[in-house]
Image (cartoon, grey):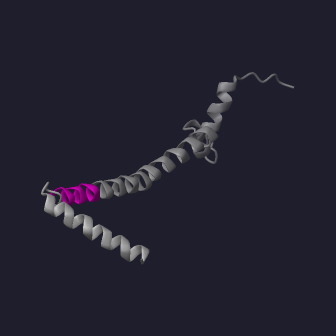
Amino acid sequence: MEDINFSSLDYYKSLEENKFLDKIYFLLKKECFDIYNIILKLFNFLSFILFKFVERFIYIITNFFGFLVMGLSFILRKIHNGILDNYLVWIFLGLIFLFFIVKI
């Protein structure tokens, strides 16, 4: 029996040159089958989706309510102008509103 002497690097080189295994070996070199990279890409994708849809939706809702409160405060500032007669009218309108709610 002959003594075959070759290094392990030659073995992997032969895998690279094999027509059936060259694509798989290429993907292995690119770490496509590495579980860490697969999970990392999955979480990167999920974080991208959460950022684009959920975070933007929350941003739109908070801006909507912010502008709504600003608009209402602008209207209330114009209504409550410091004239005592207007305050008395608002007090009586509020009492009438409360009477309708309580139904006294």
Nearer to me, 67 or 21: 67
The spot of residue 67 in percent (x, y) is 26, 56
Q: Is residue 68 magenta?
A: yes
The magenta span reads 67-78
Image position of 99 with respect to 23: above or below: below
16 to the left or right of 52:
right
Q: Residue at left 24%, top 55%? A: 70
Q: Nearer the viewer, residue 34 or 3?
A: 34
Q: Is residue 32 visible?
A: no
In the depicted structure, whether residue 94 falls above or below residue 36 = below
Residue 11 percent across, percent down from the top left: 68, 30
**What residue is at 30 percent from the left and 67 percent from the top?**
94
Residue in view at x 57 percent, y 40 percent: 37
23 sits left or right of 102 in the view: right
Q: Is residue 7 above or below residue 36?
A: above
Is 9 or 55 nearer to us in this picture? 55
**Could you say where residue 15 lies in the image, as x and y percent from the top left?**
64, 37
